[in-house]
Amino acid sequence: MVSKIIRKTPTKPTKDRRSRRRKKTPLKNITNASSIIIASINKSIFTCHRRLLKIFTKFTNIGTPNRRKQGFHILKKFPKDEEQVDNLVCRSLSFQPVLPPSLWPEKNTIFLDLDETLIHSRTDPPPEKFDFIVRPRIDGELMNFYVLKRPGVDEFLETISKNFEVIVFTAGLKEYASLVLDKLDSKGVISHRLYRDSCKEMDGRFVKDLSELGRDLKRVVLVDDNPNAYIFQPDNALPVRPFIDDLKDRELERVMKFFEVSDGFEDMRDAVKSYIWEGDQIPEMF
């Protein structure tokens, strides 16, 4: 039996088949493809930019009302405005802390105010009682400052420096405060000194922002007599009564008692919350 080989003939001519193959190929014009891709990228960038503008607009519209407290004019909380937005962006991109890393990373940090917390000073005429004189040149003028140390300040500084990193953070001018600290810190127990140029000025008052100093806020306490100084981080503040000239003052004994037992807390802000004043008695912790 003779087998027959049957060949299927194409139903369409060769020209049509070639035409169909050409239709299935990618875009023949590479320039057109590139322009489409670029247009898509530009659209994505524009959309992202528009969304970011909406987000920043919401931030800048947030505000806080004024707060007042008896005996003090309390500043606003940290303003959530354009400055805050700028700070948030800058911190995420290139944050540079004011202080270098601690030499004792295992220690918590105490920030101490200077005037009316550790000492009191005044200019001429000289008072009846003072411990030493400093003569800074301010705005080209030589001035006399008569300094009275708060009772117990020498023992206080030496004691807390054994278990804590001690930093003085004052709103005083460096020309003045540096001379006072040279005499006050004769044993060199203060690790760093921060002056007015490290504060933020708000409504003519100087605020100490602890968040920019390179220390974990869980491990920080600010001892200060001025509530405006710690308006940004009130939970980290240990308030003290202002010192003027009372030689029977025992405020630093209270503060020293606090730091003796504060190591039992993982978060120093919890320790501050447990600090209780009891008239003229040393505060208790529980």
Image: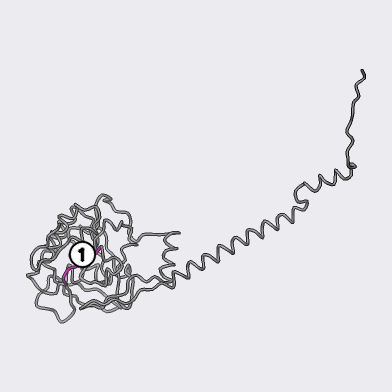
> Closer to the camera, 241 or 17?
17
x and y percentages locating residue 59 in the rendered image: 44, 69
Residue 30: within the magenta? no
Considering the image in quadrants, where does the C terminus appear? Answer: bottom left
Asked if residue 5 is positioned above or below residue 27 in the image, the reply reads above
Q: Is residue 86 left or right of residue 18?
A: left
Residue underneath mark 1: 238
The residue at the point 81 percent across, 47 percent down is 22
Residues shaded magenta:
236-241
The residue at the point 77 percent across, 46 percent down is 25
x and y percentages locating residue 131 in the rendered image: 12, 70
Q: Quadrant of residue 199?
A: bottom left
Three-letter residue code for mark 1: Leu
Q: Quadrant of residue 170?
A: bottom left
x and y percentages locating residue 36 in the rendered image: 69, 57
Query: Looking at the image, what colour scheme do you see?
Result: one colour
Considering the image in quadrants, where does the N terminus appear? Answer: top right
